[in-house]
Image (tube, helix red, strand yellow):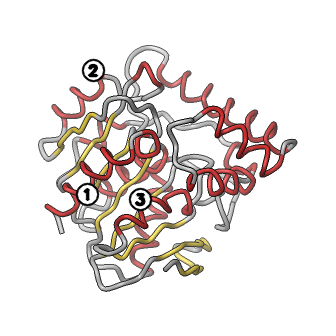
């Protein structure tokens, strides 16, 4: 079902996987230190309805890893250039974490590109110390990436199985592969002050915000969700209890039900 491709878009070589088929295109943007293959379970579940396309972001997977800017705006521009290069006609889009931020930047700054979008636990932080937490989180990611290099693929799989007992077995191999592929260029820049409120105020297309439980590691808390709903009239919110930051991995059936219904309404 999967085919592997490369395309140059906006001067960047982007690797991507694609299910193909005659359905409408659905482009999915992965989270930080993941790759396109990390969408395999969801993509497989949706492949009978959609032509699912999962690119590797710059610095991740098998895509180019230039030095410099890795902001949400830049990643959103990359995604817009990728969609244009593939001649996709107003695809549905979605993303997780960093990929949700990428998706938000895409639909805010390129309003004519996508017809609808879902955001899985984006980095919507509020209050004093929000930027410091984002910088600290990126530093922890870099430390974890270097530590994983010493335990290898099988060690990463074993570590994540122990940490995430709710995940399906199909998740771990792709997760481990992605962790081994992420490049130092991604970690070299200080994360931007991410103006998610300003971006949400520009969104016009139907958008689904999928959130988990902050007590289990979810980023979007009730205050941030309420702020998002206030700022974006086209926004719907789906809370999936019992999930943390990786909502689709923690509670796959509930996630598929919510996101699948949203996508079906907006084909």
**On residue 223, which mark appears?**
2
- First along the sequence among labels 1 and 3: 3
Q: Answer yes or no: do the residues labelled 1 and 3 have beta carbons within 8 Å?
A: no
**On residue 42, which mark appears?**
3
- First along the sequence among labels 2 and 1: 2
Q: Where is residue 138 shown, x and y percent of the image? A: 63, 34
Answer with the quarter of the image where residue 243 lies: top left
| Residue shown at the point (65%, 62%) measured from the top left | 61
Furthest residue toward right: 150
**On residue 260, which mark appears?**
1
Q: Residues within 10 Å of mark 1 (few under 14, many from 20)?
A: some
Relative to 138, 17 lies left or right = left
Q: Where is residue 202 shown, x and y percent of the image? A: 23, 47
Relative to 184, 98 lies left or right = left
Numbered disc 2: secondary structure:
helix
Image quarter in which the C terminus is found: bottom left
Residue 171 sits above or below residue 22 on the image: above
């Amino acid at each position: 079902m999967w085919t592997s491709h490369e395309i140059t878009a906006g001067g960047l070589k982007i690797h991507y996987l694609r299910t193909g088929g005659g359905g409408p295109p659905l482009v999915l943007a992965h989270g930080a230190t993941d790759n396109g293959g990390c969408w395999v379970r969801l993509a497989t579940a949706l492949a009978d309805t959609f032509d699912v396309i999962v690119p590797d972001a710059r610095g991740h997977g098998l895509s180019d890893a230039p030095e410099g800017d890795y902001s949400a705006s830049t990643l959103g521009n990359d995604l817009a250039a990728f969609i244009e290069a593939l001649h996709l006609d107003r695809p549905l889009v979605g993303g997780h974490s960093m990929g949700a931020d990428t998706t938000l930047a895409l639909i805010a700054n390129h309003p004519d590109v996508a017809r609808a979008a879902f955001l899985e636990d984006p980095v919507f932080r509020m209050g004093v110390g929000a930027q410091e937490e984002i910088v600290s989180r990126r530093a922890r990611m870099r430390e974890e990436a270097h530590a994983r290099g010493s335990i290898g693929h099988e060690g990463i799989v074993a570590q994540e199985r122990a940490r995430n007992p709710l995940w399906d077995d199909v998740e771990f191999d792709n997760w481990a592969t992605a962790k081994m592929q992420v490049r130092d260029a991604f970690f070299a820049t200080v994360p931007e002050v991410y103006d998610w409120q300003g971006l949400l105020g520009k969104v016009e297309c139907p958008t689904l915000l999928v959130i988990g439980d902050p007590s289990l590691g979810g980023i979007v808390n009730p205050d941030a969700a309420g702020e998002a709903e206030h700022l974006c009239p086209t926004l719907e919110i789906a809370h999936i209890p019992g999930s943390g930051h990786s909502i689709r991995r923690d509670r796959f059936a509930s996630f598929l039900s919510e996101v699948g219904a949203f996508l079906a309404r907006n084909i």
